[in-house]
Amino acid sequence: MPIDRSPPLPARFPERRDQTSGLNLVQAADHNLRVTLEALRRGGAMTRLELAQVTGLTVPGIANILRRLTGEGLIETNSSARSDRFAIRRGSAVSIGVDLAGARASLIATDLAGTPLFAEEAPAAESEPAEATAWIRRAISRLSATAPGGRLFGIGVTAGEHAEAIRAALAPYRAIVERDTVAAAISERQSGIATADDSFVFILLGAAVRAGMIIGGTVFDGAEHKAGLVGLMRTGRDGRYLDEVAATSRLPSHDLSNPAVQQWLDDAAEHLTDMIIAMAAFIGPRLIVVGGRLPTPLLEALAARLQVLRRSRMIDPTHPFWLPEIRCSTLSEQGVAQGIAAIPFLDILLPDMRRTVLVRQSLSEDRGPARANASAVPDRPPPA
């Protein structure tokens, strides 16, 4: 059977997973408000006409939305002789993201505009429910002093063994549990190198190799929310589990001058390339992002090896004509924490990549003060 070596089709018809057709007036109004806030978050200060052009809404419709957002204190107006420009008011809406899945616990506070307010790290012992809850409550107090008058929209927590206990202990604050792979992909989509790509895969390196996928602008989570367990794939000439080769537990140190580290990079790149080829054939993402809780120079060295292997495989007659571009994450080790901090805003104010408009609206009608997301089921452990 001949190999299909045709190049990818041009992106003439962008994916539209988040359709608004068939929505009632309340759902449509919620969608339009989210789209407007997202335009301001990405583009900065804009006039009514510029917002109408970016969002596709009418100028009168934009005026109504801006009036509502101004009344809620979320945006501010900069008036001039020529026109009024609207922007998200710094510190008006804030959230906290807590990453408890790494070797060290990390916490970041941010506002709706994406401005980091402060970041903290703590030993892994802080992942225990009592210690983690006390740590987060201290951060809430610090946030009150850092952004006085700011409204705390929620706390995002990475899924793990104690995540549900921590979520319950934080009541009455809204706490949302989400997988770290989803958080990493969302972070890259919002403020990393994937801001212009609505179909990409984030490879998260850690104790297991996993992937967060955004396809057509929507998080792809799979049945039972188990998509992305790529570490269970058999790769390489020796057919080993990817986790056995590329998991960070196999990494002897973070010193690039160490020959053992160089060998890990070579082996990991070879096995990851096989996984990327399989993903390119079945999913067809435009971009592969490599990241994790590792130093940036180490990730850049791995991405450079993957790029070399990508070029060599593309000219091999037994491999695909096209493979997605491979890039290193630009968000360093804080990427997961930044992504989990964005979850409360996606839940209430911004277009939510985790679910469609209709599902999002039905869930928003039954919000409690603290809630776990359906996709927050922890990943199963890698094979022994």
Image: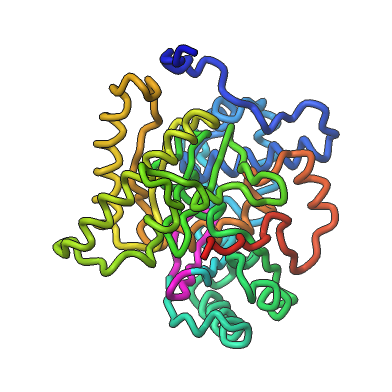
Vertical placement of residue 316 versus 269, above or below? above
Q: Position of residue 276 (x, y in %)?
A: 43, 38
Residue drawn at (28%, 36%) of the image: 309
155 or 383: nearer the eye? Answer: 383
Seen as rendered, the residue at the extreme front is 238
Q: Position of residue 46 (x, y in %)?
A: 50, 37
- Residue 176 in view of the camera: yes
Dividing the picture into quadrants, the one containing residue 217 is top right
Seen as rendered, the residue at the extreme left is 257
Residue drawn at (67%, 25%) of the image: 58
**Which portion, as a residue range, is magenta?**
102-118
Vertical placement of residue 256 versus 62, above or below? below
- Residue 71 in view of the camera: no
Residue drawn at (26%, 69%) of the image: 253
Vertical placement of residue 220 versus 173, above or below? above
**345 relative to 197 in the view: left or right:** right
Colour mode of the rendering: rainbow
147 or 220: nearer the eye? Answer: 220
Q: Position of residue 153 (x, y in %)?
A: 65, 63
Q: Position of residue 270 (x, y in %)?
A: 32, 44
**122 relative to 63 in the view: left or right:** left
Residue drawn at (50%, 85%) of the image: 125
